[in-house]
Amino acid sequence: MRHALLVLLFPSFAALAAPADDTWMSVLLDGRKIGAMHTTRTVEGDRVITTQAMDVQLDRAGTKVALATSETDTESRDGKPLAFESRTLISGSANVLRGSLRADGKFDVASEIGGVKQTRVIAWPQAALLAEGLRLANLRTGLDAGTHYRQTAFQPESLDAVEIESSVGASKNVDLPEGKRALTKIEQIIHLPGAQTSTVTWVDADLTVLKMAMPLMGYDLTMLACSKACAQAPNQSSDILTHAMMRAPAALSPNELRQGVILKLSAAGQGPALQLADTDEQQAATIVNGVELRITPLDADARPGREDKPTAADSQPNDWLQSDAPEIRKLAREGAGAANTPHEQMQHLEQFVRSYIRKNLNVGYASALEVAKNPEGDCTEHAVLLAALGRALGIPTRVVDGLAYTDHYAGVEHVFVPHAWAQAFVDGHWQSFDAALHGFDAGHIALSVGDGDPWRFFAGFDTLGRLRVDAVESLPASPWQEDSR
């Protein structure tokens, strides 16, 4: 899951897309080279074709994970969107989305994820632009210091439009791998769904981006324009998962994990407010210098549900949870066995997935159908398969992105590590089920919930890597009981 977050940076770069005909960039994470980015812009008759491709390599507890993304935008010379293509390759698993303009102004979209091909028609978001449209809009705005403007950028990989606020700063000499350049600073706030992130870019007079910096899970991600040889130089080791771990000041006891805990959290360094989900099992409240988080497993307390009831989409198949596939339906029936109620079915499915999948950290992020056919992976593969099996039985489900407590990991004791699990709407509640670990307990911190699409786990974008646990307390009583007194 953590590596999928890196892909989100790619469209953010495109938000200020004003490339020269051919630009290479070196990608650095806290000063360590992890990959390269290549941007090209060509004019073919009345069309402009912009392609951005990024290849990075990361470590995950000693295991190498490769990520390659590319986006190709086809537009008219005046910036009208005509077609797009987004490709992602994570540890050998390829996903593709293509869109083309129809006569009625809508877009035909074809996707291929986990070997499943689907088609749909989407309406183009109002005022949304692709690379050339953004380039032209930026040229019209100019580089006068103090200029502030807003734009809407379309992200092909998620079929979303995001608003971007840009502020033009002063010009100064900026160090690049091949010497200093006089560049203009532009600060951006990118309003991702459910969260936001920020970037700082430095551009030349033609608005070609030559440097970009942004936060990622407590790291500084930087892209620097340089020669092709520089960009393609050997990468350096960078373990992003270890950096995202969060130490606890004391061990969580078995009773606390079973009954519930109160965590006092704060953010290390500067950045936006901490993003934490409110669920039927977790309640966040702002306190001085941070957040108080109350976590109570539903098995420990059958309190009334606080969250909204599921929508129709929570029970339907999608690109990542292919619950209508014959392979998924067969596994769902096999895993549920003789269970009768939805709660019992999810319990059986949780145990089934736990024994079905072989642990393999080389898998980056696979869809449920990929896991059904090749049962290996880490927590994300357990989560998407479990969620898809639940939907195949008509149970509303979703996937949670967060952290989970363990006594030791990668040589560190009493630590929360990035994790994913599933939730199902059973017995009038959204209840968690964790097939990758020994079930759900109060050691799980939910950052966001989604439909299994890795592009939509935005809430943890600036939270992972910045979280600190200042104190741990046993939960004396459930929040709903206290509220009723």
Image (cartoon, rainbow, N blue to C red):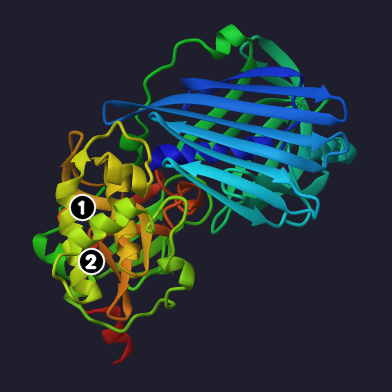
* Discs 1, 2 touching: Cβ within 8 Å: no
Q: Residue, x 56% and y 38% (percent of image)?
A: 9
Vertical relation: 394 (above or below) 223: below
Quadrant of residue 397 within the rendered picture: bottom left
Q: Residues within 10 Å of mark 1 (few under 14, many from 20)?
A: many
Q: Which residue is mark 1?
A: 353
Q: Residues within 10 Å of mark 2 (few under 14, many from 20)?
A: many
Secondary structure at badge 1 equals: helix
Secondary structure at badge 2 equals: helix
Find residue 190 and report its horizontal and vertical position in percent: 64, 48
- Of marks 1 and 2, which one's residue comes earlier in the chain? 2
Q: Is residue 307 visible?
A: yes
In depth, the one of 71 and 416 nearer the eye is: 71
Find residue 273 and report its horizontal and vertical position in percent: 50, 56
In depth, the one of 380 and 29 nearer the eye is: 380
* Mark pair 1, 2: CA separation: 10 Å
Q: Is residue 426 left or right of residue 145?
A: left
Vertical relation: 97 (above or below) 179: below
Q: Residue furthest front?
A: 326
Name the quadrant of the N terminus: top left
Quadrant of residue 306 within the rendered picture: bottom left
Vertical relation: 413 (above or below) 42: below
The tag on residue 346 is: 2
Find residue 432 and report its horizontal and vertical position in percent: 27, 65
Find residue 399 and report its horizontal and vertical position in percent: 37, 57
Q: Residue furthest top?
A: 229
Quadrant of residue 335 within the rendered picture: bottom left
Amino acid identity at mark 1: Val
Q: Is residue 217 visible?
A: no
